[in-house]
Amino acid sequence: MSGVLWSLLGVLAGAFIAIQAPVNAQLARGLGVPVAAAAISFLAGAIVLGVVTFLTTRSQGLVIDWRAPAPWLFVTGGALGSVYVVSAVLLTPRIGTAALMAFLVAGQLLAGMLLDRAGYLGVAVRELSMGRIVGALLLLAGAMMIRIY
């Protein structure tokens, strides 16, 4: 049963990404500066995550060692996320939410396949099979069809 719940959480998170893009695009339209909208979005997310972190660590009796060293690679997640948010703010009004989501999923799939193939960042190595390659090409073709038609 927990596998189903985790899968549903993934679907819900994907839906939130689809909703976030036009919300941030509207914010950018209102502010007149797309990068400012992305910054405000990140600030709001940082505040929410800070509150959730505080509440969960307190309730579980955990203490975070903020002085613990972290390799530079592990703190780049926010920078990568900022590229997504700024791109979504810029692209949503230009290509639409459905096309944006299609291209995002295609990009995620291609990057995921490369990460899997290389075993990068500790992920299990998975070979590039013909089925995976054809599936990725079909997804790219579908993304193009959503954008063009």
Image (tube, rainbow, N blue to C red):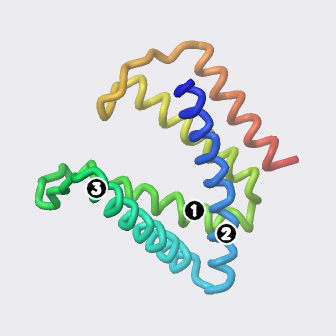
Which residue is label 2 attached to?
23
Residue type at the position of mark 1: Ser
Q: Which mark is residue 87?
A: 1
Secondary element type, mark 3: helix
74 shown above or below 83: above
Which residue is label 3 attached to?
57
Residue 25: x %, y % from top left: 66, 71
**Which residue is drawn at the image coordinates 58% and 76% (left, top)?**
34
For the N terminus, the image quarter is: top right
**Which residue is drawn at the image coordinates 60% and 28% (left, top)?**
4
Secondary element type, mark 1: helix
Residue reaching furthest to the right: 149
Mark 2 or 1, nearer chain start? 2
Residue type at the position of mark 2: Val
79 shown above or below 74: below
Which quarter of the figure has residue 114?
top left
User: Is label 2 in contact with label 1 (beta carbons under 8 Å)?
Assistant: no
What's the distance in space between the residues labelled 2 and 1, CA to CA? 13 Å
Mark 3 or mark 1, which is nearer to you? Answer: 3
Residue 144: x %, y % from top left: 76, 42
Residue type at the position of mark 3: Thr
Answer few, some or many: residues within 10 Å of disc 1's Cα (few below 14, many 20 plus, some between 14 and 19).
some
User: Is label 3 in contact with label 1 (beta carbons under 8 Å)?
Assistant: no
Residue 145: x %, y % from top left: 81, 41
Mark 3 or 1, nearer chain start? 3
**Which residue is drawn at the image coordinates 73% and 68% (left, top)?**
93
